[in-house]
Amino acid sequence: MSARSPKKREAAISARQAIASWKQAKGLRAREAIAGYFFILPMLLSFLAFFLVPTISGLGMSLFDWDFFSDPAFVGLENFIELSRDKLFLTTLKNTALFALFATAGNVGLGMFIAIGINSVKWGWLKAYLRTAYFIPFVISTVVVALMFGFLLQESVGVVNYYLSRLGINRIPWLSSSAWAFRSIVLIDVWKHVGFFTLIFLAGLQAIPSELYEAALVDGAGRRVRLTRITLPLLTPSLFFSLIIALIGAFQVFESMYVLTNGGPGDATRTVVMYLYREAFGSFNMGYAATMAVALFFIILSLTAAQVRLGDRWVFYR
Amino acid sequence: MPTMTSVALSYGNSAFQDRLRRKWRVYLANVALALPLVLGSLLMFTPLVWAVSFSFGQPHEFFTLPPPVIPSSFRLDNYHGVFERVDFLRFFLNSVFVTGCVTTAQLITCSMGGYAFARLRFPGKRIIFILFLASMMVPQHVTLIPVFIIIRGMGLYNNLGALIVPYATSVFGAFLLKQFFETIPNELEDAAKIDGAGFLQIYWRVMLPLAGPPLATLAILTFNSSWNNFFWPLIFINSADKMTLPLGMIYLRGQDGVTNSGVLMAAIVLNLIPVLVFFMIFQRRLVEGVTLSGLKGA
């Protein structure tokens, strides 16, 4: 026993200590992992129950013919073939795409324009007022907005047409003609959402360092050059973001049409989601409705992917 | 340009006029810039003002021209009409209940998730987080029918729970809080650990008290979207006593003599009041929240 040198004994002790602390660390690590899973448990359960399982079964459902009450019958890709020949689906797709185009252009274009305007207003109180005023409609529910405009835009007794007639403009069939119903819904959508995009662009404008403008002033750059060479290039990330979320939102449009026109006149304002809703909860064609949802998803996905691809070419990253 | 000013000053009075003129020109340029923006902002208010004034209008006035933009009297008949036809208070209370539950639940679950993703190490963390983020990209209509079946299976059809349970967490909220919790210095957490605090205590005693601002932002954004949710109640609720405000409005419109009437306008005003009060109180945070969600993407 006494043959063991003090050095060896020391080494043995330190090894034992190392093992003990390693074990302790392992215990701590395990405890941390358990805590981690515990903290994400609510989110994980919700993810499984309301996203992962539904997404997979939604994809699967598109391969079945199912009316909710009898047993589903496997039909392969037949739903997709039927969908590609379904005239109403193509009409709703066209309506949705046109709506997305005009609403996105209106919301994002006007939002950028207004934000640049507000940003160059000199008086702080006016800036604050304008920002608030344009944003107010965003907090009002789409249903209330739609009901309100439905009242104001009546053809014969509506207040909007009354004032237009005072200005010498003929009554406009805001909601009763196919062409105008579509335009009205785009206009209402821009009224409600333009303030949101204004805010996003205002945030982008505030992120532009003021030194750039100061340097440009020293170089003798005028207002126009500063706008086209500094402001607009440095706003492209905000523009890119706005275009993506505006388009994703617009392709899922449903509420204002449902409330205001119920898809009419004819099918002039019927969108993909409205058709999907009717197939699923009106006709109980669950498989076919799921097919539409999957098609819509891939359309949105490919458009977003294309935007991201193209974005590399024109978005200016500092 | 100091030299020019001093030169100009030597000319005395005319230079003063010159400066005044230039000042005026700048002032006018600013007014010219602001004017279209101010006029545009009036377009945002006009429909709301009209809704308020028409809510006082009498039925016979709606078929006469000019329309009663300035109410002939401030009679509350239309408001009585709303409460006679539907249980408006019930809609309101249902909305308050659903929105309150959804907001509270999201504050808890999102802060828990955000804390775990920001500060704890566990196997599979990255993959799980990426999967969560990916779920934000999928439109809700893809999951609509299966979720409908699941909710029915849970016995929540035509139950306020159907409007709460699927919205009890949000990936956006967890992301928001994760970003915040990552900025908290390690020293705070280490000090708590040395004092023998467990992870639950660190979350509750250290992290949450610091997270006031992002929690407030999340609460306001969640409140707003839950309050205005229409699609979900449309699918899951079919009896009037379970309706929230947006669906209740459609139900009211279906009652006798309500379509495009003063009664409908009165109900719209009753809808606007709480929303505008909410907006006035939380304006700054709301703007901050939207800006934040915008910057995140930009």
Image (tube, helix red, strand yellow):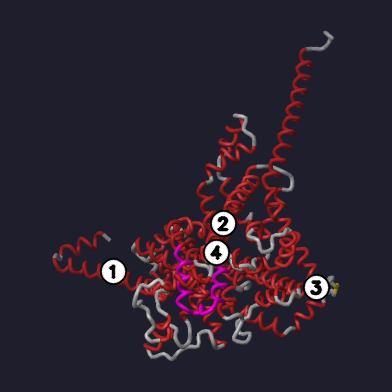
Percent coordinates x, y for residue B36 in the rendering:
38, 74
Count up the numbered dots.
Answer: 4
Amino acid type assigned to the residue bearing label 2 in the image: Phe
User: Disc 4 designates what residue?
Assistant: B91
Residue B12: name its quadrant.
Answer: bottom left
At 25% from the left and 70% from the top, the residue drawn is: B24
Does B109 sit above or below residue A241? above
The chain identifier of the residue carrying mark 4 reads B
Tell me the CA gap for discs 2 and 4: 10 Å
Between marks 3 and 2 in the image, the one whose residue lies nearer the viewer: 2
Label 1–label 4 contact, CB within 8 A: no
User: Disc 1 designates what residue?
Assistant: B27
Amino acid type assigned to the residue bearing label 4 in the image: Phe
Observer-nearest residue: A294 or B248?
A: B248
User: Disc 3 designates what residue?
Assistant: A66
Report helix, strand or loop for mark 4.
helix
- Residue B147, label in figure: none
Q: Say if labels 3 and 2 share a chain.
A: no
Percent coordinates x, y for residue B84 in the rendering:
50, 70
Most frequent secondary structure within the magenta stretch: helix
Q: Which residues are magenta?
A: B244-273
Tell me the CA gap for discs 1 and 4: 51 Å
Label 3–label 2 contact, CB within 8 A: no
Does A81 sit above or below residue A302? below
Q: Is residue B20 left or right of residue B166?
A: left
Tell me the CA gap for discs 3 and 1: 69 Å
